[in-house]
Amino acid sequence: MPVAAFPDLIPAIPEIYLAVSAMILLMLGVYSTGKQTVRTVSYLSTAALFFAIPLTVMVTDGRMVTFGGLFVTDSFAVYAKILVLVSAGAAIVMAQDYLERQDIARFEFPVLVVLASLGMLMMISANDLMSLYLGLELQSLALYVIASFQRDSIRSAEAGLKYFVLGALASGILLYGMSLIYGFAGTTNFDSLAEVFKAVNGTEPHLGVIVGIVFIIAGLAFKVSAVPFHMWTPDVYEGAPTPVTALFAVAPKIAAMALFARVLVGPFGDLAGEWQQIIIFISIASMALGAFAAINQNNIKRLMAYSSIGHMGYALIGLAAAGSAVSAEVRAAGIQGLLIYLAIYMFMNIGTFACILLMRRQGRMLEGIDDLAGLSKSNPVMAMVLAVFMFSMAGIPPLAGFFGKFYIFAAAIEADLFALAIIGVLASVVAAFYYLRIIKVMYFDSSEEEFDRPVSRDMKSILVITGVVVILFFIYPDPVLNGAELATSALFPQ
Amino acid sequence: MILQAIAFWVFASITVAAAVMVISAKNPVHSVLFLILAFFNAAGLFVLLGAEFLAMILIVVYVGAVAVLFLFVVMMLDINFAELRQGFLQYLPIGLLVGLVLLVELAVVVGGWVISTDATARATAKMPAVDQVPNTDALGQLIFTHYLYLFQGAGLVLLVAMIGAIVLTHRSRPGVRKQNISDQLARDPKETIEIRKVQSGSGI
């Protein structure tokens, strides 16, 4: 019997490296018994995640496909992977103190975060419906566990269970859609699918294919928590431990959004006429719900949940523009806007959650918006930083959030999606109300007590880095803009 | 050929009959036993199709593990199945109606279903030729060569599931006496045994 050629492992080195380091860290945690084990594993996990960034950049050289077409890496994957790795690393750093104070510091937490990020990298690099699904499940399964990591708290257990049940439902929907696509086309590979649907182009695609795409979009919309698949978000965000919420709000969203873009633009690119209207609808619904439902919230984690639903709505505008029939440049502008938005969203959210993690009196974590009252007098620096993030989320120039929205709306207008752009602007005006309310509470309401000090060095550095990026983005936006342009070019080969 | 036809009809009819008995038997233990019978006959059908590996897997995995597990669950859980069955007749008409509607819908969908012309060619592209490779080899080639990446990915998912189960349920309780063999072997007779000379006739 002939021996099969060994697959080219070079493109997948970052993933292999992360998998191996997760297993080594697991062994380290299991077998070392010292008091510092948890801290050591935590630092090493962060280091492993950050070290994967240069590895990803170095390995990728143009478009590389391996494992018989199951796995792809290109500049688009590199861009999304960097965002995911940065946010997962930041989440571990932010979690350490919190977990120790809550007495739930266990070495499995960073290991699970590393495995979840591995799943996200696999999602981003998927070039086949099967590898997409496996990456998604690896990511989700690890996240279900860390959602209920605080297992003595009923709310945390509830969050994990809710996330698990609804996530399983979404996976089922996704798989059903994939089976319909496979049944029609006889292949699950993205490149072959693109060819199949190119041949169909011009004639009306078959009903089964459209139903399949709708189901795939529904499954992915659940993962990015777009309306009407958002029901789990507020409860899970509120119940999960705060650093876990910080991770949920950023890394899986970025990975799922990148996957969304790759699936819709790649294999289903020629069926844009079919899926664009769905994306437009879920985008509008998410923006509207994110704007209106957050107004009444008193818990800041719930508020951030609705805020993230709204932000995903804005990001989806970019995807809707990528389905435009105007020209290839317009489609590319949509994806580019989406990628820029995701990068800025990541910095704003990490910074905001770092502030939320500092809301603590006499060792007790606080989550109420009222608890921020008088922060401007008791801790002016933190109040100022949080105010910067809130202004940025509301989209006030010259902060970074404004530019994210600017590129998205510009792409929508180029794609002739005027109504979508106008609704987006209106929704962001409504959303500005609750962001500004937080600033009002901090600066104009009377003080109760101070938050606990001192702030740890890790937290300070995260706040400084994210704050500086958000404030100074307008002076030197080139890394993000050029990166997004390069990444977009990988999805639209000339 | 006639022998194969006879074997097919025997296996097929027993499978269907056993499957009917699974859902109609009064005693749940009998249901599980009929399920095992159905599995064995389905395995026979696989052998007739030339899929001997699937046949063995069906027996090893489904009969050896799953059905036995079912049997344990059925025997251990104190569920009153007679009570669960109450109202069966009452719900029968609406159940039949829902089933009928689903059947009609399925027929409509399948009737209008169009498959891309070369779908079969694409779907079978990666399969080794059936007449050249035994199907155990063929499955091995697909899983461990073509889909190596997916196989490893699935392994990682299982690893996460294992870590998750331990994280969420394991509690280290204080005061549990565990056997520690190295401690036991390291015991020195000098520290644990004291030898005293005892004069005969008097106690210690």
Image (tube, helix red, strand yellow):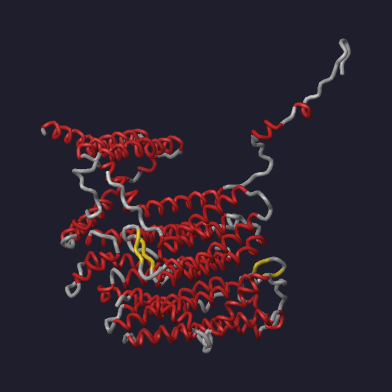
> How far from the left and from the top, in percent, is residue A418?
34, 87
Asked which quadrant contains residue B12, the reply is top left
How many marks on residues? 0
Tell me which residue sits at (46%, 69%) in the image: A57
Residue lying at the far top of the rendered structure: B201
Tell me which residue sits at (64%, 64%) in the image: A98
The quadrant of the image that shows the N terminus of chain A is: top left
A87 on left or right of B40: right
Along the line of sight, which residue is nearer the eye, A448 or B130?
A: B130
B43 on left or right of A125: left
Tell me which residue sits at (24%, 39%) in the image: B46
Compared to A309, does A115 lie above or below? above
The quadrant of the image that shows the C terminus of chain A is: bottom left
A117 on left or right of B193: left
Residue lying at the far bottom of the rendered structure: A397
Residue lying at the far left of the rendered structure: B2
> How far from the left and from the top, in percent, is residue A317?
38, 79
> How far from the left and from the top, in percent, is residue B120?
19, 56
Residue B118 appears in the figure: yes
Tell me which residue sits at (67%, 62%) in the image: A101
